[in-house]
Image (spheres, rainbow, N blue to C red):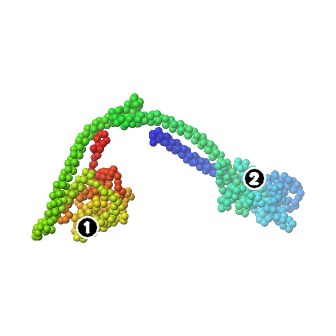
Amino acid sequence: MKLGLKTLVFMSIVLTGFVLLGLAYFLFIRSSFANLEEDFLNRDLIRTSNQVKIMLENIDYRLADWSQWDDSYNFVEDKNQDYISSNLNDETLALLDIDMFILANKSGHIVQELYADDSYSCENLFAKEFGGQRVLRLGFDRSQAEIQSGLLTCANSSILFVARPILKSDDSGPANGVLLFAKYLHHYISNLEMQLLLDVDIRNFNDPSMAEDFWMAKENLRIGDEVFTYSDQGSFYGYLLVQDFYDRPGAIIKITRPRDLTAHENQMFAWFTAFMLAGLLILLTAIYFFIRIVILRRLKGLYDFFSKVIQTQDLSKRAECDEGMLKMRGRDEICGLCNNINILLAMLEESQKSIAEQANEVLEINNKLLETDVLKEVLFSNISHELKTPLTAVRAYNQLLYDESFGKLNAKQKETLEIVLRSTDYLNSIICELLELSRFEAGKAKLFWEPVDIGKLIRETVKEFSPKLREVKGKVKVTCPKKLVIDADSMRLKEIFQNLISNSIKYKSTRRLVIRINCVLKKEGDILISVEDNARGISEDDLEHMFDRFYQIDKNVRTGEFESTGLGLSILKHIVEAHGGTVRLESALDVGTTFFITLPVKKPAPEEIYARKFRNSRQEKKTFVMKRDFSGKKL
């Protein structure tokens, strides 16, 4: 990704971050305003509840004047028409601001009652017909002893009422009856709206025709709450439950508060966001053009300069800061970088000349080494021809003598011939191993790749050592998955296991020899083979030299069947690395030795074999240098 695009991406991220912060702020402020508006609504519900109490107090205040009045007290007894004509006319209810006026004597018989035009449907709420007369319903006659007030429901309406005993003007008794004032609650809607400055609606709790939102409020108020609130985008809605005279749900008062704060907040945030985004876009645009003109264009000049240096491979070029190709003016960090680049190019130019001289010297040395390798190959070829040919004849004639083909031999002669034969075989093995090692080191050893069942090959090798294992009372335990097939040279792999098993037998300790061979398929696609024994083990000083040529743990061992040339492990390592694998060992004296061999399952490419070998050599803290001349050719 180019720097210009990266700059745009960075600015887009910054812009997105600002937008997200703005949204978070918006949501926080909106939540705060919503909580504030809900608090206002709850206060309005409390005010509504208080207004209902004030309504009852107002009714009671007017009722007290009439119930504690000598004229009312005497009217209950004499029912004089002057009281009716002067006080109980068509304007009485309007002047008292009530919908019902009921006056009863101390026996409960109604003496006088007045109803507003829309009150006849509920006239039997407080009175009933009994014995041809209208009397107060049971319960309201207690008003002769105490003041009663509250709310009652009738049909789809709710009524506030107050009942007082009728006393004399000096508040003396005994009570001569009951006077009851009542008013429909819905007639107070306009008064409530004026007091609260909000929309108000009232419904009977058991009104089957009320709106859906009242039903929702009813379900929530039924569980014991006195208030219920909810909101939408435009308003908050509060519902107040008013208990009736018998402490049952009587009426639901709904108030609607517009979400003015939220509307103003939305408008304010919209303007704020618009100004912020506009300012941010202007700022980011200015920053982008500043970076593009002051920094990116100059860096582009450096990039073009380096591209030309790489294309021409001419280290004599220099970046000119004040004029020329870069045209950089000023004394800022980029000009300082330009000067440092010139210094670095000068150093590289000097190094290039020095490397070229050293490359020529290395080339000469390498040619001499190649000549030496050729001489070495000729030498080993001559050794193979000049030594192995007569050695074969010597071995054959000694074998004929040992087999008594030319006559009987005594015991001393036979023993001498055995020594000669063994020494001849030992010398032949040295020559063969030297030739094989030289082929590996010269990179001329050939592998015949084929699918190899590794478990089967190991078990076949172990069988070859069965007689010797029985002789030393040892055993080999092989743990290898069935049909674990890898690409390899079966004969070369067999040499590996023959070498390791023979070494374990040769250097066994006094305890019973046990060799464990395990195969594990690794996730990387390689196979790990471990060969563990409980032989004498190897000291720490000897461990780092175990794969060196001609190195022996016990240099005085030259007797018995398993004389050592000191080349076996070196050849083993070359075989493993030729397969693209690695080998390492762990050992401790009087404990035993474990070899870990890692081989690829599939035949690796030649460059992969080299890379694996190089990594292995780095792990062994050895340095391998690939010599190149300055043109890039391998030497």
Q: Is 481 left or right of 91, judged from the image as shown?
A: left
Report, in whole angstroms, how far the alpha carbon at label 2 lies from the one at label 1: 115 Å
Q: Is residue 620 left or right of residue 298?
A: left
Residue 465 is marked as 1
> How far across and how far down the image is residue 157, in percent?
76, 58
On screen, 296 above or below 174? above
Residue placed under numbered mark 2 in the picture: 188
Q: Is residue 64 visible?
A: no
- The structure residue drawn at horizontal position 64% and vertical position 49%, both measured from the top left corner, is 233
Q: Total marks drawn? A: 2
390 lies left or right of 532: left
Q: Nearer the viewer, mark 2 or mark 1?
A: 1
> Residue 65, how many percent across, how many down?
79, 55
Type of residue at label 1?
A: Phe
User: Mark 2 or mark 1: which comes first in sequence?
Assistant: 2
Residue 411 in picture, x, y percent from top left = 11, 70
Residue at the spot 37% in from the left edge and 57% down from the top edge: 525
Question: What percent of the width, then of the height, locates residue 503?
Answer: 24, 63
Residue 488: quarter of image: bottom left
Under mark 2, the amino acid is: Tyr
Quadrant for the N terminus in the image: top left
Quadrant assignment for the C terminus: top left
User: In the structure shown, which secondary structural element does the residue marked by tag 1 occupy?
Assistant: loop
